[in-house]
Amino acid sequence: MGSETNLCLPVIDFSSKDLKPGTPVWERAKSQVRQAAEDYGCFEALFKNIPQELRKAMDEALEEVFALPIENKKRNVSEKPFHGYIGSSSPMSLYESIGFDDPDDYKEVERFANIMWPEGNTNFSKTVHCFSKTLSELDQTIRRMIVESFGIEKYLEEHMNSTYNFLRVTKYEAPKTTEKKTGLRAHTDKNTTSILYQNQTDGLEVQTRDGEWINVKFSPCSFIVIVGESLSAWTNGRLHSPHHRVMMSGEKKRYSAVLFTVPRDGYVIKAVEELVDEEHPLQFKPFEYSEYLKLRSAEIGKSCELPLKAYFGA
Ligand SMILES: O=C(O)CCC(=O)C(=O)O
Ligand SMILES: [Fe+2]
């Protein structure tokens, strides 16, 4: 348990223009998504719809926002746990992050940019909005494939409408050591789906069901898709929600941007009844996401093997 390997994540290509529901390209990707989500809860998505220029602009936007004085970044507050600014006064910590809701809505990106830069920052707003909107389309494709693969299309609309988007950008300081230091400790994502982008600096590690850690290598057009606990619970545990962490070494700072889909307040996550039967007994009691988030944030710092199971196991 816990050892490192040369294992790789499954790779799925979403770049084809023919990737439309019902086409052979769609059907093939759909079965790959289902398999990867069951086996790893994670895969590498090749997605050329976000061209290199937009990635470069995003890298610059990430550097620009973290270069701001801490006073500016701290002005980004949120009532929701983990949704505002997270920094640490500990010199040991490599982690700093900032997030805001609905980045696929230009007005919301602009609102965030106006908090960071009182004079506004149109370049930043345009880049982050375009990036988030395109990534959100990839997310919708993936979730539609998952729903179709289980034959539960009657819930497609409800499922899509049950979430909103949240963008969190993170900076990991370079530890300037050859030995690995923890950038972000091992955790499972609580939300529905997460799609991860990084500047070309590796550090993400994903744990397999057998407890081995995969060092994730990003290609220039890849994004990493992670199944969150809420999606795992909705599919009655059929999809795996993997532990992952960030381990840093060397001289290069790492920046990441994650588009999270998050269950809306008041939405009760309940396993789809078609996915519960004798062979697949109910795994989790229905729960409300914001309630779970509060429980988890009260226990921050404590690690737990299977947190959702601990609170809402059936
Ligand atoms: O920065 C990364 O690569 C991972 C971030 C992450 O796992 C998270 O924010 O939940
Ligand atoms: Fe995560």
Image (tube, rainbow, N blue to C red):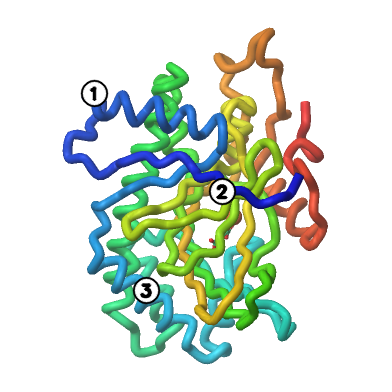
Q: Residue furthest front?
A: 6
Type of amino acid at the residue the image marks with label 2? Asn
State the image quarter where residue 247 is shown.
bottom right
x 64%, y 28%: residue: 237
Q: Kindly report the distance in space between the C-alpha atoms of the residues bearing marks 3 and 1.
A: 35 Å
Q: Secondary structure at mark 1?
A: helix
x 66%, y 40%: residue: 288
Q: Are marks 3 and 1 in contact (CB under 8 Å)?
A: no
264 versus 82 height, above or below: above
- Circle number at residue 59: 3
- Circle number at residue 212: none
State the image quarter where residue 60 is shown.
bottom left
Residue named by callout 1:
24
Q: Secondary structure at mark 3?
A: helix
How dense is the environment of label 3, judged by Cα within 10 Å: few (below 14), some, or many (20 and up)? Answer: some
Type of amino acid at the residue the image marks with label 1? Pro
Residue named by callout 2:
6
Q: Is residue 189 visible?
A: no
x 43%, y 60%: residue: 197
Q: Is mark 1 within 8 Å of ligand 1?
A: no
Type of amino acid at the residue the image marks with label 3? Asp
Residue 16 percent across, percent down from the top left: 21, 40
154 versus 191 height, above or below: above
Q: Is residue 241 left or right of residue 104?
A: right
Where's the C terminus, which quadrant?
top right
